Amino acid sequence: MLTINGDIPDRKTGLELAEKYGIDGIMIGRGIFHNPFAFEKEPREHTSKELLNLLRLHLSLFNKYEKDEIRQFKSLRRFFKIYVRGIRGASELRHQLMNTQSIAEARALLDEFEAQMDEDVKIEL
């Protein structure tokens, strides 16, 4: 079995490399930090609310699997920058999220922020 990884930004690029080199598997690592929608079959534009909802999903999954394996909430903080960007007030929201101590607190902050958003803007990934 032959796999590749490194500087693969999305599914499309990975599949092109797989076809070109005849490999069996593809790993996307840091590419997900730039584009959290990297695994989409049909890439499209995304909005700020979609990114915030994806962060909510990340929080839910963390909470679900935390029961199986003890994890510290602090380990989630490094991911906030992936989802909170390209919108007015993103820097302040990231700062506030970095000071949260629980999933419930982070969710409440996201809800409050989203309720005050002027508009749902397209995000450059």
Image (cartoon, helix red, strand yellow):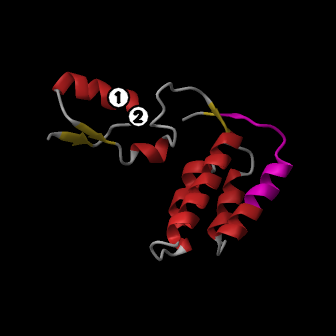
Q: Within the image, what quadrant is residue 111 found in? A: bottom right
In the picture of the structure, the residue carrying the numbered disc 2 is 10
The segment highlighted magenta reads: 109-122
Amino acid at pointer 2: Asp
* Residue 75, numbered circle: none
The image shows residue 72, relative to residue 60, as above or below, that is below
Question: Tag 1, which secondary structure?
Answer: helix
Question: Tag 2, which secondary structure?
Answer: loop
- CA gap between label 2 and label 1 equals 6 Å
Q: Within the image, what quadrant is residue 94 found in? A: bottom right
User: Relative to the observer, which residue lies in front, 31 or 11?
Assistant: 11
Q: Within the image, what quadrant is residue 10 found in? A: top left
User: Relative to the observer, which residue lies in front, 84 or 18?
Assistant: 18
Dot 1: within a 10 Å radius of its alpha carbon, few (fewer than 14), some, or many (20 or more) residues? Answer: some
Dot 2: within a 10 Å radius of its alpha carbon, few (fewer than 14), some, or many (20 or more) residues? Answer: many
In the picture of the structure, the residue carrying the numbered disc 1 is 13
x, y percent for residue 44: 57, 26
